[in-house]
């Protein structure tokens, strides 16, 4: 019921504390299966300071809009593009929807189809339903990357674009984006790379010497990339990123917004009023950590995932779904559902789907948390 009279801030906060006491928190180290993390304190401070900025009405917040453009420029350069076009959006879901929307609007096709790997994130289901684009699923190979030959076989005159994934949600697999890029160029189709997770991992992991396929705008067939600062970028939720190679993609999804206090503008995002603070936090984190800072975060995460994968293999009845590519380790077990239930009872934030449990080495996950987890898993398996 809507309260008639207000309560003091202390009373309200006390009630909130009680109500949220059941939540798992990232800094407890118990959340092992999420791609989110406790945001960097500096990014949280930037959000707090600029909480009132609205990028839906950039005529009022001209400075913030400039900062968003600079953030997009820095992300573009990380992804091998001198000048990119895009926005800081609410997350990977919105970014993927915008890419599909741009491809659909630019294609002159009556019954549009999008070819994507079976490993694609469920955000494409939302895009499909909203945009009336039929999804055509391409098979995976044994290593869980998309079968590029199957993608080619599925191209028809209705195809509006192809999706490749750089860091799949379940296993962190990076598709053969160079081959998809060549295919896209051969058929004159745009390729979208969903690097919602991998975008803030792969450039740094490659610089550390990990052998990971190229995935970004250096490949000419790649026309758009999703890259989420609210995952490994350590920016508070909601902060996603969509970047297009050419302005025409952004123009294809822009609508006029005439009734704004700051004057008429064009909006390409799904959200109208949208948080400027998050875009400022993306800018601030990139400036603060720089390439070297993110590289250190990724170094830790990658090393931890290799160590964890090796430890998992020592537990009887537990097997890796595949060797980790990024900082995601997924494993199966004979009695997976029971193991999941028991792990949950013991307070671990993990879940089983598609026959495995996924552990994501986010910045809040430390070795001591994983040691405790391995101890519990060993006990459960020996049962
Ligand atoms: N794409 C990939 C590959 C993802 O892993 C995710 C989320 O896990 C998304 C898109 C959707 O991102 P969000 O939950 O920020 O909308």
Image (cartoon, helix red, strand yellow):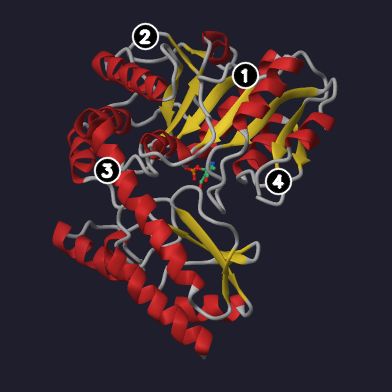
Quadrant in which residue 46 is drawn? top left
- Which badge, 4 or 2, is on the more N-terminal residue? 4
Marks 2 and 1, Cα distance to the nearest angstrom?
36 Å
Q: Nearer the viewer, residue 358 or 325?
A: 325
The reply to whether callout 2 and callout 3 are in contact (CB within 8 Å) is: no
Q: Which residue is mark 2?
A: 263
Q: CA distance from mark 2 to mark 3?
A: 43 Å
The quarter of the displayed image where residue 60 is located: top left
Where is residue 217? Give x, y as percent.
Answer: 51, 20
Q: Is residue 45 above or below residue 60?
A: below
**Badge 2: how crowded within 10 Å, few (<14), some, or many (20+)?**
few
Whole-percent x and y of residue 9?
16, 57
Structural distance between the alpha carbons of marks 4 and 1:
21 Å
What residue lies at 57% left-to-right and 53% top-to-bottom? 170
Between circles 2 and 1, the one closer to the viewer is 1
Horizontal and vertical percent position of residue 111: 82, 25
Instruction: Provide the residue designation for mark 3.
Output: 296
Q: CA distance from mark 4 to mark 2?
A: 44 Å
Residue underneath mark 4? 118
Q: Earlier in the sequence, mark 1 or mark 3?
A: 1
Going from the N terminus, do you reach mark 2 or mark 3 first? 2
Residue lying at 64% horizontally and 39% vertically, measured from the top left: 124
The CA span between labels 4 and 3 is 32 Å
Tell me which numbered mark, 4 or 1, is placed earlier along the sequence. 4
* Mark 2 vs 1: CB contact within 8 A: no
Residue tagged 1: 221
Q: Residues within 10 Å of mark 1 (few under 14, many from 20)?
A: many
């Amino acid at each position: 019921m809507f309260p008639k009279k207000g309560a003091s801030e202390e009373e309200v906060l006390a009630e909130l504390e009680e109500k949220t006491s059941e939540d798992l928190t990232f800094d407890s180290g118990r959340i092992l299966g999420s791609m989110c993390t406790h945001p960097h304190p500096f990014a949280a401070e930037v959000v707090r300071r600029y909480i009132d900025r609205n990028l839906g009405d950039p005529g009022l917040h001209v400075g913030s809009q400039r900062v968003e453009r600079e953030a997009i420029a820095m992300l573009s350069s990380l992804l091998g593009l001198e000048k990119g076009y895009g926005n800081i959006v609410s997350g990977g879901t919105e970014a993927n929807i915008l890419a599909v929307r741009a491809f659909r609007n630019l294609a002159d096709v009556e019954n549009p189809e999008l070819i994507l790997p079976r490993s694609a994130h469920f955000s494409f289901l939302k895009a499909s339903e909203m945009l009336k684009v039929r999804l055509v699923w391409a098979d995976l190979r044994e290593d869980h990357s998309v079968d590029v030959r199957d993608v080619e076989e599925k191209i028809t005159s209705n195809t509006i674009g192809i999706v490749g994934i750089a860091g799949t949600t379940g296993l962190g697999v990076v598709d053969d984006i160079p081959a998809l890029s060549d295919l896209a160029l051969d058929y004159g189709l745009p390729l979208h790379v969903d690097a919602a997770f991998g975008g803030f991992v792969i450039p740094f992991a490659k610089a550390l010497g990990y052998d990971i396929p190229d995935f970004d705008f250096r490949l000419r067939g790649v026309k758009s990339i999703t890259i989420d600062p609210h995952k490994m970028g350590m920016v508070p939720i909601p902060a996603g990123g969509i970047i297009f190679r050419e302005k025409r993609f952004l123009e294809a999804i822009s609508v006029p917004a005439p009734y704004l206090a700051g004057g008429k503008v064009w909006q390409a995002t799904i959200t109208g009023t949208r948080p400027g603070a998050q875009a400022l936090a993306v800018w601030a984190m990139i400036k603060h950590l720089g390439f070297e800072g993110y590289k250190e975060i990724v170094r830790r995460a990658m090393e931890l995932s290799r160590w964890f994968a090796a430890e998992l293999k020592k537990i009887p009845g537990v097997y890796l779904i595949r060797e980790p590519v990024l900082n995601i380790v997924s494993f199966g077990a004979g009695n997976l559902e029971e193991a999941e239930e028991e792990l949950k009872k013991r307070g671990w934030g993990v879940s089983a789907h598609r026959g495995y449990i996924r552990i994501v080495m986010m910045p809040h996950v430390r070795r001591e948390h994983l040691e405790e987890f391995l101890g519990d898993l060993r006990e459960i398996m020996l049962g």
